[in-house]
Amino acid sequence: MSKLEKILALVRSINEDEFQEQLTHGNTLDDVYEELVFLSEKMTSKKTRTESIIEQMSNCYAGDFFNYLPVSDANDELDVFCMGFNTYVEELKDVMVSKKLLETINEKLVKEKDRSEQLASARDQFLSNMSHEIRTPLNGILGFTDLLLNNPSLTSEQKQQLDFIKMSGDILLVIINDILDLAKIESGKITLTNKPFNLSQLTRLIQDTFAIKTQDKGIDFQVLIDSKVPPVLIGDSVRVSQILFNLVSNSVKFTPAKGKIRLKIKLLEEDESHLIKIIVKDSGIGIPPDQLHGIFNPYIQVDNSVSGVENGTGLGLTIVKKIVDIMNGDIQVKSKLNEGTKFTITLPFPKGDYYFEASKDLIKNEKKKLRPVRSSRIKILLAEDNHVNQVLTQKIVSAFNMDCMVVANGKLAIEALMKEDFDLILMDLMMPEMNGYEAASAIRALKNHTKKNIPIIALSAVVTGLVTETCKAVGINSYIAKPFNAEELRYMIMELLEKR
């Protein structure tokens, strides 16, 4: 087969898989051209539709609930999402225009203090539904991308393209998390953890995350950590990484080609706690003086129409400010137009016997890596209704050298468990006929001691604050949010099987 025929076969397979169409049947250069033009038009259309969907969803989040998402003739996953969203809008409209509810709402606007709580609850539910619908396909995108990146036969160009896909998916996931985190912060539902973490490793991860973008733009991005900064701190590493990610993301976005970004970390003082100063400085376009005072307000963005920089959600700096406040820290910003911007953050971290704790965790993790659970193959039961996630999870579990049986809902999971023996169940939560919560409750009520006590891990795109509590209440042992990390899943499986 010639290179031309291989290219044509590859493009046709993409068109058939993605758009269920094959335009040509020959093996000429004209056929390649026609197939590529069709693919380009379809991808451009998808990008345009996705941008329109994100814009209208942002408007909906801002308060305009009655915007309908556009439905095309493509009948693809975007259209399925749009139709589901529009159905939700119709139902919401029917409820809101009903006279009784309008009278109740108007009365509560004037007389009842809990009006805001009800709106916050409705907003959280909407955000949860939106997050679930986006996270489910995103789990497939990121999961299969990770699998492909592990293929040793990839060319450098193919690996670069897959890196771009993963980077785009990671950014979309950050945006979703930002929206949900802002809702949690505003409702007072966010909590901080105090665990040992390595600040140097965390900053390297941030640097690696933006490596492709900074290299493409020729940006000189350096991380400088003072030797006096303790190697291990006690605090919420997730929130610290969120702060760094948003600040560095802004710097990368607004710094022109061949510019500079510096992430500096210093120890200010050491008394009852470690007071850490974090500086993110860039040589970007800067912020106009009249806009500087409002940059931490939600949905406010610097006017970058002249610079041609793409807009984001306008939530990043808002979340940074709120997280810093919750952590009892301080954030300051200085900027000069066309010269750059400098963010300075101070955060206190409590002292403790963290070296011992960190070493103990490290030894525990090493034991996990080395100690086998058993000599025979582990048998997993997967309850998942989404076909893409079925295939993805099955491939990941198979890569762990484990057997995996798939069923489409909780009822079928119980039936399979009664017929066969399994070592562990991976349970989606939102499934037809019988959801994961109901299935877990039914399993814990079985008379067979072995089967009723089987470890259950929830794999779900539901990420509301109550999900972990509900999982515990029905007997689910552990919970992993989609999109999930394969290694995290493997460690959790091994940990539960060791305990068993």
Image (cartoon, rainbow, N blue to C red):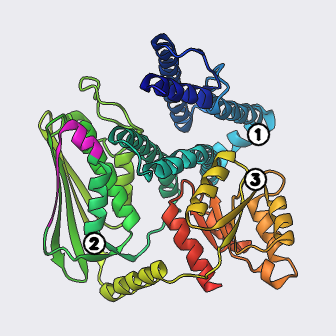
Q: Residue at coordinates 19% horizontally, 34% vertically from top-left?
A: 256
Residue highlighted by disc 2? 348
Q: Earlier in the sequence, mark 3 or mark 1?
A: 1
Density class for disc 3 (Cα within 10 Å; few <14, some 14-19, many ≥20) is some
Query: Which amino acid type is marked by label 3?
Result: Met
Residue highlighted by disc 1? 101
Whole-number angstrom distance, CA of label 2 to CA of label 1:
47 Å
Q: Tell me the SS state at disc 3.
A: loop
Q: Residue at coordinates 48% horizontally, 15% vertically from top-left?
A: 37
Whole-number angstrom distance, CA of label 3 to CA of label 1:
31 Å
Instruction: Say whether marks 3 and 2 touch (CB < 8 Å).
Output: no
Whole-number angstrom distance, CA of label 3 to CA of label 2:
44 Å
Residue highlighted by disc 3? 431
* Percent x, y of residue 414: 83, 66
Residue 321 in sight: no
What is the residue that sits farthest to the front in this orientation? 1
Q: Tell me the SS state at disc 2.
A: strand
Density class for disc 2 (Cα within 10 Å; few <14, some 14-19, many ≥20) is many
Quadrant placement of the C terminus = bottom right
- Say if 472 sits above or below 75 in the image: below
Magenta part of the protein: which range? 212-225
